[in-house]
Image: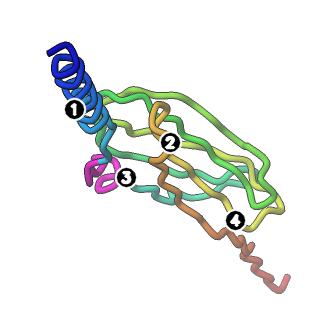
Amino acid sequence: MKRQFLSAISKFTVGLALFSGVALTPTRANTTHPIEKSAEVKYLGASDDAVMFKVSFENPSNTKYVISVVDEEGNQLFQGIYTDKKFDKRFSLPKSGSEKLTFIIRNANDVEFKQTFEISTHFVEDVVVTRL
């Protein structure tokens, strides 16, 4: 009798452990972040020493996001943390010898979500020669 009781308890414990393991295992649903669909980076123009961009996206859940801008050598030009529901900011970045800028938008809490925008930059100055 005692043996049957211990057997029943051990089966219950094993079953409970298996159920807990399956029930408590974190699952990664095929979720998409709202930013994936709405994020955009627009070129606004350039001045003698700076180039301007507009970054905008919807963040309906007020999640904390980090926005970084790096050049082609990996030097960080900007980094900021935001929780705006409607993110709409202008960036004025210094012109450098770099021909590529990368905007990185990532979730501060979820390291798996990261969206990047690579922008190739090549500036040509217009020169007009007039005869005097």
> Which corner quadrant holds the C terminus?
bottom right
Furthest-top residue in this view: 2
Q: Dot 1, how many residues are within 10 Å of its Cα: few (below 14), some (14-19), or many (20+)?
A: few
**Which of the marked residues, 3 or 4, is nearer the chain's N terminus?**
3
Q: Earlier in the sequence, mark 2 or mark 4?
A: 2
The kind of secondary structure element at disc 2 is strand
Note whether 104 is above or below 78 in the view shown: below
Please tell me whether residue 68 belongs to the stretch shown in magenta: no
Numbered mark located on residue 71 in the image? none
Q: CA distance from mark 3 to mark 1?
A: 46 Å
User: Marks 2 and 1: in contact by CB < 8 Å?
Assistant: no
Residues marked 3 and 4 touching at CB (< 8 Å): no
Q: Residue at x 26, y 24 (%)?
A: 10
Tag 2 and tag 4, C-beta contact below 8 Å: no
Element type at marker 3? loop
Residue highlighted by disc 3: 39
Q: The disc labelled 2 sits on which kind of residue? A: Arg
- Upstream in sequence: badge 1 or badge 2: 1
User: Which labelled disc corresponds to residue 100?
Assistant: 4
**CA neighbours of label 3 inside 10 A, class few (<14), some (14 to 19), many (20+):** some
Residue 87: horizontal and vertical position, in percent?
Answer: 37, 37
Measured Cα–Cα span from mark 2 to mark 3? 14 Å
Q: Looking at the picture, how far across and down is residue 49, in whole percent?
A: 76, 51
How far apart are the two marked residues, 4 and 1, measured between alpha carbons?
A: 56 Å
> Which segment did they paint magenta?
29-39
Q: Is residue 61 visible?
A: no
Left or right, 125 with respect to 83, comes to right
Question: In this rendering, which labeled residue sits more in front, label 1 or label 2?
Answer: 1
The disc at residue 90 is: 2
Q: Which percent across, then down, holds residue 17?
A: 29, 29
The residue beneath circle 1 is: 15
Q: Nearer the viewer, residue 111 or 87?
A: 111
